[in-house]
């Protein structure tokens, strides 16, 4: 004999608060250095940024490296990164 039970309880959606913005669209305040990258067939110098220092509205164009405690994000050439109101990093390919 097999008995299966599935129950659901409706719960209210969590309310996410927006992070504070520093008002600046650039990410210069998060710059911690430069790093050498090899992209396809060329070596380039790219900004190295502290991901945790980025605030809502900040953005940058690739190539770049965004370093944080638990991950590193490579932003390739032709891509743009921006930080949304909840501190998510949104990567978008720039149109040609």
Image: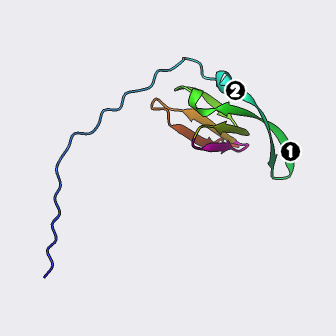
Residue 35 forms part of the magenta stretch: no
Q: Disc 1 to disc 2, how far (Cα)?
A: 20 Å
Residue 73 forms part of the magenta stretch: yes
Segment tinted magenta in the rendering:
70-78
Locate residue 37, reporting x and y percent: 80, 44
Q: Mark 2 points at which residue?
A: 31
Front position among marks 1 and 2: 2
Residue found at x 54% / y 25%: 55
The picture quadrant where one finds residue 26 is: top right
Q: Mark 1 points at which residue?
A: 43
In the rendered image, the residue lying farthest to the top is 23
Could you tell which of marks 1 and 2 lies nearer the N-terminus? 2
In the rendered image, the residue lying farthest to the right is 42
Q: Looking at the rendering, in which quadrant would you find the C terminus?
A: top right
3 relative position to 73: left or right? left
**Secondary structure of the residue carrying numbered label 1:** strand
Residue found at x 60% / y 33%: 51
20 relative position to 46: left or right? left
* Number of residues whose C-alpha sits closer than 10 Å to that of mark 1, classed few (under 14), some (14–19) or many (20 or more): few
Residue found at x 54% / y 17%: 23
The picture quadrant where one finds residue 22 is: top right
Q: How is the image coloured?
A: rainbow
Seen from the viewer's position, the closer of residues 13 and 6 is 6
């Amino acid at each position: 004999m097999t008995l299966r039970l599935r129950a659901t309880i409706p719960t209210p959606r969590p309310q996410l608060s927006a992070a504070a913005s520093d008002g600046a669209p650039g990410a210069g305040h998060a710059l911690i250095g430069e790093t050498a990258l090899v992209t396809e067939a060329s070596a380039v110098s790219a900004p190295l940024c502290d991901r945790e220092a980025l605030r809502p509205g900040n953005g940058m164009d690739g190539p770049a490296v965004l370093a944080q405690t638990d991950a590193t994000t490579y932003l390739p050439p032709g891509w743009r990164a921006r930080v949304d109101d909840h501190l998510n990093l949104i990567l978008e390919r720039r149109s040609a």
